[in-house]
Amino acid sequence: SKIFTNYVRDFFGRNQLSQFMDQTNCLAELTNKRRLSALGPGGLTREHAGFDVRDVHPSHYGRICPIETPEGPNIGLISSLALYGTLDEFSFIEAPYCRVVHGKPTDKVDYLSADEEDEHYIAQANAERDAKGAFVNEYVLGRHAGESGEFPREKIDYIDVSPKQLISAAAGLIPFLEHDDANRALMGSNMQRQAVPLLKAERPLVGTGLEHAVARDSRSIVVAKADGIVTSSTAERIIVTKDGKMPGKNAKPDSYQEYILYKFLRSNASTFINQHPIVVRGEKVVKGQTLADGACTDQGDLALGRNVMVAFMSWRGYNYEDAIIISERLVQEDVYTSIHVSLEDVVARDTKLGNEEITRDIPNVGEEELRNLDAEGVIRVGAEVKGGDILVGKITPKGEADLAPEERLLKAIFGEKASDVKDTSLKLSSGSSGIVMDVRVERKQDPMKAKLTKAELKAKRQQKEQEYKNAHNDIIDMLGHELGEKLLGQKLSVPVLNDKDEEIIPADRKITKMMLGRLAACCDTYQMKDCDEKEAIEEILRNYRNKLRNNEQCRQEALELLEKGDGMEPGKISSVKVYIASKRRISIGDKMAGRHGNKGIVSKIVPVADLPFMADGRPVDIILNPLGVPSRMNVGQVFETHAGWAAKILGMCVATPVFDGIREETILELLDKARRIKVEEAGWTIDGNNRVIDDQGRDRTDDFVGNDGKTRLYDGFTGEPFAQKVVVGQIYMLKLDHLVANKIHARSTGPYSLVTQQPLGGKAQHGGQRFGEMEVWALEAYGAAYTLQEMLTVKSDDTQGRTKIYDSIMKGGNELIAGVPESFNVLLREMQSLCLDVRVKKNSSNMA
């Protein structure tokens, strides 16, 4: 009904809880689907929500993540579902626990609500247990009625299913989370969602083991539905069969699996979605195996960034205040290059003055500007475009009011038609560039439809009905043929009835083609008692039912389209969408971050030759400020640095689950193992005192990363070693969706505010930079009187002075004649509105 339709449209169009899906990367998509909100209809408002509502509560344990929440005014009101949290039939969140019987945990899992949990004694998942699984200690750390403490093991009813059950998917991807301060962990989990998919994805050397689960559950990767052999593996599709042979035209749908891959799609966040196969023809695959990677996955694991060699040291002041120094190699080798797809669209409408037209014939535009447009005025796919280029040519009829006086005179004398239209072409916004990836044109299918008679419309309807009826009959014939292959000439132990209880296939009689035809015709409504034959019949019918339903759906859609026309909104003649792909290399001003809330802005891109390097000549990729670690208390990044360094040399990936990860002693062992490998490669030895001795008998211990995680670095300019040893290792760094190319903006002239006459602010309004009171103080302190006068008058709201300085510049001069700024008049009017009679007296002797 219309009322129901309006309710649905209103919910999806206006409701606060109906949001445009965040598709920056697959983690952002997954998190968006698992989001919990206390706002919206029937909920709280952020203005009236106090600290007690926003704070973490004992009932959140295993249900709502205590870490992942926004940083702004919505903190604590918007949160994420915990990893194992689920909803009951009343939509209350439940958490899973393993039942404990006589002090021994069992495999029986119960889902408890917060109320039910309060009644039980629940032990932590990391409680010490013996070989048989029973608790070792007499007293076990646990929770009861919201309070933590140690309880006798006989009292314990349940135990957590996993140490990571209290956090969300994004927080669960942070290695060594237990060593990070909660504030920085919050930033880390939020910033992972902002990471842009890179051109070359690389899985982290140090992960948590959740990477594959997130990639799989976000449906970014393609996984095998059944065991088999890859028959075909192309960029667009993968076919898997049981015997490895290519299926024929008449092959049964269940005899093979076909996986269609997403190619070169644009996400909601203008990032790039593209799947590519990682299996080859002839390869055996098992159910659940990864067949194709997505935009931000590598070998089936989530891959949001790249592993890079990082040094924690100050370097010529360029990494002051969290600034990040990066190597030129990262730019040249496209390590942090990402693809972005922008959408530009234009609509031609039916106006009062006539129809708008998409055309190549645009007035006062040279052939050079039209070189990339086709005959219809639409840009060709593959064209390279930059800011200001015409993407779609469009002309709009001009009214008399739009014409200049001289145009009106010419029109009256010559009746000229060329000036009847104005250029309203779609142009690429300034500062943008890229390559046209795709063009989609929609037109009214039948502009003469309004003139169709009822008889013509009826004839077209009958024609469509006949087309789909023929398709329906073809499917029924194919079904009858396949049933015949299995049942023709055989006997059934029970009869088959139609929906009117009439016998269509009697029991214990040879089945004929006519009987099978009757069964095929009523495949949706036939009745038969359960038996072995029914299972065989159902297996065949199941596939054909879907085909019949699809055919019926297509028939209804085609008839609806015939009634409505082409589905375009009234007044719209045609629309053109142009997709432009641009390649963004990392540049100064881009935002980068690790997974521990260690964020910063790229301040300098340094040539490889000038960077600090190790004793074997390898330069570092990124330099971070060591002062960014102690005060932020996110020591997890240091652990990751050491573990990453060892993993890189040992050629392995480390999975360190949250709250149950790799221990310090293990990292030290891995570091020592890695050092021994590097020493062997150099052909040197380690003596009894654990010192590295080279072939000339010199002590080279400091040239290798030792158990303290530090090594000696050498200055790229002088070649001399630095005075102190430096922490060097591998960190997984992300490039965030805060790109300087989208933010940088300049203004010469532009729009002004009507009230204050000051330039507007912001890139969207083509505005200027705000020159606030603190900036004024800075110029006052420096004594820059003329610069200050210029800022507060002609560059702001001195309307007459603006015109005068423009005239002066046009004549080749640079005279500054400052007048009274408009803000002074605004102040006067405001005081007058407060009933203060303030008047301005002009002193004629001081006037210019």
Image (cartoon, rainbow, N blue to C red):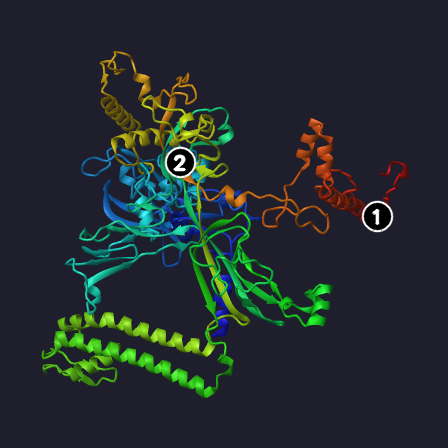
Rendering coords of residue 506 (x, y %): 14, 83
Rendering coords of residue 726 (x, y %): 39, 22
- Give the labeled residue for mark 2: 330
- The total number of labels drawn is 2
Is the C-beta separation of discs 2 and 1 under 8 Å? Answer: no
Rendering coords of residue 520 (x, y %): 22, 79
- Give the labeled residue for mark 1: 835
Other residues around mark 1 within 10 Å, as few (<14) / some (14–19) / many (≥20): few
| Identity, as a three-letter code, of the amino acid under mark 1 | Cys
Quarter of the image for residue 820 reads: top right
Q: Quadrant of the C terminus?
A: top right
User: Looking at the image, is mark 2 or mark 1 earlier in the sequence?
Assistant: 2
Question: Marks 2 and 1: which is nearer the front?
Answer: 2
Residue 86, numbered label: none
Q: Is residue 174 visible?
A: no
- Is 189 in front, or is 827? 827
